[in-house]
Amino acid sequence: MNCFCMIFLKLQETLHFHKKTEVESTSNITDAEENTNAKKDSNLISLFKNWPLMSAIIVYCVFALEDMAYSEIFSLWAVSPRSLGGLSYTTEDVGTVLSITGVSLLFFQTALYPIAERKFGPIMVVRMSGVLTIPLLASYPYIAMLSGFMLFFTLSCVSIVINIFTVSITTGTLMLQNKAVEQRQRGAANGLAMTFMSICKAVGPACGGALLSWSQKRLNAAFLPGDQIVFFLLNVIEAIGVLLTFKPFLITNHY
């Protein structure tokens, strides 16, 4: 009888200790999760307060908005009839131009961009690319006056150069973002940049299509008729992006 009582008491004490351990373990996990969430919130707030990062993201978004609007406009403009200021191209013709552009971009990004970045630095590459894009965009209404092989050749060359500048701007602004934060924050910083950029890339095509449609209804306007107003407004956005690459707006911070 005494042995039975001793065993019973011992089992009861063991079960009680096990429950206590479970409670302590759950409490520790909860505290760890709260600490992790607090650190995440603190890191996010510090990113928003990091002006070198946020200024680079804003510049990136402005150029992304212009690029997406341009990409939408280019294809629609090229297949539009000449009576509306377009090129009367087929979708196959547009695809050929874009394919040539893509091959050229692959060569540039792997072979030439690293040289340009080492020589001038990312800010100057972004700035020069933005400035040189402006006269090229302004040339599109005049390219529409060409025909035959000369039209195809000129359009392909301008498309290649504009897209090279676009890639240079995108790569340069991404480098500025990465240099604005510490190594441990780069994942979060890139995620924040992608979020804002995605919004611009969603808005860009819709605005571009609406702008081209509106421009084709004002072919006889006194000020910038037809597609001239389209490429003028694209240049306005491009110019804003270029202006934002100067101080005091864009500030660099190297980690």
Image (spheres, rainbow, N blue to C red):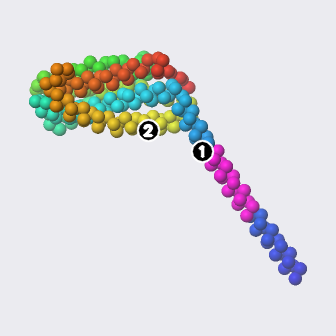
**Magenta stretch?**
19-37
64 is within the stretch colored magenta: no
* Helix, strand or loop status at disc 1: helix
At horizontal 29% and vertical 32% (from top left) the residue drawn is 69
- The three-letter code of the residue at mark 1 reads Asn
**Which x, y percent locates residue 145?**
13, 22
Q: Quadrant of residue 156?
A: top left
- The front one of 175 and 143 is 143
- Is 27 left, or right, of 255 in this rendering? right
**Dominant secondary structure, magenta:** helix
Q: Callout 1 environment at 10 Å: few (<14), some (14 to 19), or many (20+)?
A: few
30 is within the stretch colored magenta: yes
Which disc number belongs to residue 37?
1
**Which x, y percent locates residue 73?**
24, 32
Which quarter of the figure is the N terminus placed in? bottom right
- The front one of 4 and 206 is 206
- Is 197 left, or right, of 67 in this rendering? right
Q: Callout 2 environment at 10 Å: few (<14), some (14 to 19), or many (20+)?
A: few
**Which x, y percent locates residue 123?**
43, 20
Q: Residue pushed farthest front?
A: 222
At horizontal 38% and vertical 23% (from top left) the residue drawn is 241
| Residue designated by label 2 | 195
